[in-house]
């Protein structure tokens, strides 16, 4: 692995760790700044839904969505322990989960009032930002490596053909 | 000879000149001089940084980057990856456990009574009903959420009021709130939090209401209310017991699975004990519920049997009510059963529990009380409105023609009362001067009386009645007070019957001999009768039958009174926006 790839990988890992920490921490804080759900943590709020004690006419299992940020963070960490295609899959799924939960939180967390985002929502969004940043760094590096590979493959073939000749 | 990627393990075809893994794109480093003969079974270890071991020699075009690999970096990275992966796995496990706890409703509440007070204060100050609901005992409030949601929905639908938005106009401030915590039982599973000082200030600022709500008000010809500022001190919320003892506002908390919750039923029970100066709750009462009913129909019949037995004999010979109720809702009943028994005995002219009653109206021997976890036993001489069968030959209540049908709606199961006839025969006593009822509290204008019970002890309800207005101007009297001028009591027999056909109840009562204090009555009432002169009927509020909500528990069926009340409330609320109801309410 070249130095640049190694550096990119480290940055991506750092982003994943930071994202996971933020995503997990986010669900322990209130999703709204004022009013409903402003003094109760995100996971407590969705636990109420899971237990059927929250005044919303939605299925109880919807409460599982409150755990998506932390699930996404956990998947990002798990991806660090995997290699190859498996890593790509786990990381992609984790990223998708994080993005979906981030959108959901912006939409539902402050009860449809985007200006009412609470600490938990902001922390989760910051975590989503870190996750996206890490994914971006890794993607750019992957593109760079692939491009370089194509260039070098062409170059190597040229050199080998020259040597053989 | 095959080659493999160090990162993803992909196999490269023989003879292919590769510098990057085609699967994962990992850059392929040149093999070291001592790692030239690698095959399937001789995985190289001499150059851990090398990603692919290939038998081809280093080519001159190898970039400097590919050779500037830090030995050992891959190993560190993998170790870090494993650690992070393990951390991720731990988080997943914790999440799974937390979700299970959440499903069981065990992650709300507070860690201690003090923590609960803090959370409750925060929830109040931030007008956060969700946080407040999280502090209620989840076993006690089934359906509360649905009721709240219906109210919110109806407010939006019927009055165009966005409740969460409306909360923006309310600002609550808590100042210097102080409290004390007293454990009610030795095991410290029940705590009483008494608010001893401080205040709550509520500021309402109508201008802060969302535009939609303000427009709605003004469109209807109304004007926005003025801003308001009210401070309520906890000391002002104190009440006084019947014996004049000061009672500061309090809540009773219960501990479930290590978390503390506010118990509404326990708070009500404790308030009743405090206000009426009753013996305290029996916190040793162990939960020994009776058997659940084998069917919803049987649950209703068993409930009637239990009620009949208690009314007739004053004893708990009937099936224990505790078996017919959801276990979570019988806690207060078990703990405060004896206290309530004391109160009922007292109210029916008797003393407290087991003849050891106390208070202003202490009298003769009182009713016995059932054992732990059982229905209180109100037997005993002169047990008043309980123990009717003891009053005369053939006295008592009985029921016939019970028909119950079961209906399912959504997640709820209803036991609908289709028909029932209740017959009653009892001794009825009163005073000639009274105009209706049994005379105990119903004197004609001009009367001045201190009614006395059968044992001659002045009843706590002694009063006088203003001769011109008929208003009660007296009040509870002290024990042993002057006997007053109560006329002689007279007694007769009252018989009555009431029949329910699913929509209407027909009733009649007769007195023998004709009583001077009560008239014979008969009548009929139906669900579609007009409520007063409102033009509305119960059916307009969605009440089209009489039912109870039943649920399955302990291998049988139980009647859920809380869910029943919540369901009726929710149904009524959901009809508030119907045009007919809305028009009638607005005209009022």
Image (cartoon, helix red, strand yellow):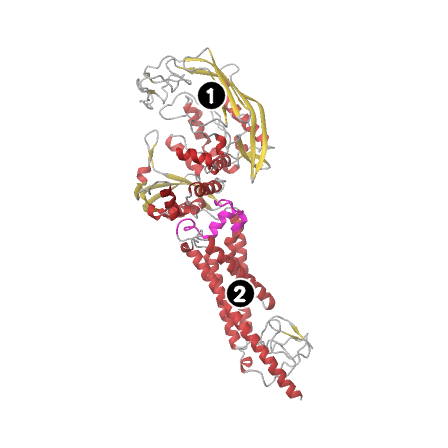
Q: Nearer the viewer, mark 2 or mark 1?
A: 2
In this view, B466 is above or below B96: above
Give the image location of residue B155, x and y in percent. Answer: 43, 41
The answer to whether dots 2 and 1 both sit on one chain is: yes
Q: Is residue B313 visible?
A: no
* Horizontal arrangement in the rendering, residue B466 relative to residue B270 (left or right): left
* Lower sequence index among marks 2 and 1: 2
Q: Residue under label 1, please give it.
A: B380
Q: Which of the labelled discs sits on residue B83, or is there none? A: 2
Q: Is residue A120 visible?
A: yes
The residue lying toward the viewer, choosing from B134 and B392, is B134
Q: Residue at x 50, y 74 (%)?
A: A7
Give the image location of residue B111, x and y in percent. Answer: 44, 48
Q: Which residues are magenta?
A: A34-63
In this view, B17 is above or below B319: below
The image quadrant where one finds the C terminus of chain A is bottom right
Q: Secondary structure at mark 2?
A: helix
Mark 1 belongs to chain? B
Query: Splitting the image into 4 quarters, where does residue B16 fall?
Result: bottom right
Mark 2 belongs to chain? B
* Horizontal arrangement in the rendering, residue B247 relative to residue B89 (left or right): left
The residue lying toward the viewer, choosing from B268 and B331, is B268
Residue A35 among magenta residues: yes
| Mark 2 crowdedness (10 Å alpha carbons): few <14, some 14-19, many ≥20 | some
In this view, B89 is above or below B453: below
Query: Splitting the image into 4 quarters, where does residue B480 fall?
Result: top left
Q: Residue at x 60, y 65 (%)?
A: A86
Give the image location of residue B495, x and y in percent. Answer: 50, 16
Q: Could you tell me how far apart the alpha carbons at marks 2 and 1 are, in whole angstroms?
A: 74 Å
Residue B418 among magenta residues: no
């Amino acid at each position: 692995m070249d130095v640049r790839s190694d550096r990119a990988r480290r940055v991506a890992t750092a982003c994943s760790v930071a994202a996971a920490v933020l995503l997990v921490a986010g669900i322990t804080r209130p999703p709204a700044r004022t009013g409903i759900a402003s003094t109760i943590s995100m996971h407590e709020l969705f636990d109420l839904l899971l237990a059927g004690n929250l005044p919303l006419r939605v299925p109880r299992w919807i409460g599982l969505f409150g755990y998506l940020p932390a699930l996404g963070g956990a998947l990002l960490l798990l991806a660090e322990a995997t290699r190859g295609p498996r890593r790509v899959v786990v990381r992609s799924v984790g990223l998708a989960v994080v993005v979906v939960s981030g959108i959901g939180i912006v939409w539902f967390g402050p009860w449809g009032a985007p200006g009412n985002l609470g600490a938990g929502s902001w922390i989760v969004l910051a975590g989503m930002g870190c996750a996206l940043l890490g994914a971006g760094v890794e993607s750019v590096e992957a593109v760079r490596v692939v491009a370089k590979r194509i260039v070098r493959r062409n170059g190597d073939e040229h050199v080998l053909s020259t040597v053989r000749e | 000879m095959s080659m493999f990627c160090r990162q993803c393990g992909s196999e490269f075809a023989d003879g292919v000149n590769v510098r990057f893994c085609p699967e994962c794109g990992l850059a392929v480093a040149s093999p070291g001089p001592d790692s030239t003969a690698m095959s399937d079974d001789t995985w190289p270890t001499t150059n851990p940084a090398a990603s692919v071991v290939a038998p081809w020699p280093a080519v001159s075009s190898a970039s400097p980057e590919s050779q500037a690999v830090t030995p050992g970096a891959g190993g560190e990275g993998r170790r870090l990856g494993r650690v992070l992966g393990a951390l991720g796995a731990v988080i997943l496990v914790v999440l799974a456990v937390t979700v299970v706890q959440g499903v069981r409703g065990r992650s709300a509440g507070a860690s201690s009574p003090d923590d609960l007070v803090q959370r409750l204060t925060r929830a109040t100050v931030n007008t956060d009903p969700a946080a407040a609901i999280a502090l209620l005992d989840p076993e006690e409030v089934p359906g509360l959420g649905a009721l709240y949601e219906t109210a919110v929905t109806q407010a939006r639908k019927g009055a165009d009021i966005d409740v969460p938005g409306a909360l923006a106009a309310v600002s609550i401030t808590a100042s210097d709130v102080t409290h004390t915590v007293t454990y009610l039982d030795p095991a410290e599973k029940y705590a009483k939090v008494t608010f001893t000082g401080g205040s709550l200030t509520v500021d309402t600022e109508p201008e802060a209401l969302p535009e939609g709500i303000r427009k709605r008000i003004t469109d209807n010809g109304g004007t926005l209310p003025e801003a308001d500022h009210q401070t309520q001190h906890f000391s002002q919320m104190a009440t006084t017991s019947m014996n004049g003892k000061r009672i500061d506002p309090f809540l009773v908390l219960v501990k479930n699975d290590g978390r503390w919750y506010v118990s509404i039923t326990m708070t009500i029970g404790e308030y009743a004990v405090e206000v009426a100066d009753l013996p305290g709750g029996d916190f040793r009462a162990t939960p020994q519920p009776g058997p659940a009913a084998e069917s919803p129909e049987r649950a209703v019949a068993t409930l009637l049997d239990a009620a009949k037995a208690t009314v007739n004999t004053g004893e708990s010979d009937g099936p224990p009510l505790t078996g017919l109720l959801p276990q979570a809702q019988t806690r207060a009943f078990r703990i405060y059963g004896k206290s309530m028994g004391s109160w009922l005995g007292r109210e029916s002219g008797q003393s407290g529990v087991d003849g050891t009653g106390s208070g202003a109206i202490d009298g003769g021997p009182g009713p016995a009380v059932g054992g732990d976890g059982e229905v209180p036993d109100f037997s005993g001489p002169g047990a008043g409105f309980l123990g009717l069968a003891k009053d005369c030959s053939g006295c008592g209540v009985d029921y016939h023609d019970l028909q119950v049908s079961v209906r399912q709606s959504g997640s709820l199961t209803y036991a609908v009362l289709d028909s029932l006839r209740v017959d009653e025969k009892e001794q009825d006593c009163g005073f000639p001067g009274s105009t209706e009822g049994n005379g105990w509290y119903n004197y004609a204008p001009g009367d001045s009386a201190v009614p006395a019970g059968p044992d001659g002890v002045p009843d706590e309800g002694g009063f006088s009645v203003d001769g011109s207005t008929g208003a009660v101007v007296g009040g509870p009297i002290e024990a042993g007070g002057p006997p007053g001028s109560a006329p002689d009591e007279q007694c007769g027999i009252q018989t009555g019957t009431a029949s329910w056909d699913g929509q209407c109840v027909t009733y009649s009562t007769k007195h023998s001999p004709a009583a001077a204090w009560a008239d014979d009555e008969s009548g009929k009432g139906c669900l579609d009768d007009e409520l007063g002169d409102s033009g509305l009927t119960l059916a307009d509020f969605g009440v089209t039958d009489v039912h109870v909500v039943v649920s399955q528990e302990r291998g049988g069926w139980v009647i859920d009174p809380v869910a029943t009340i919540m369901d009726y409330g929710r149904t009524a609320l959901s009809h508030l926006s119907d045009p007919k109801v809305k028009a009638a309410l607005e005209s009022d």
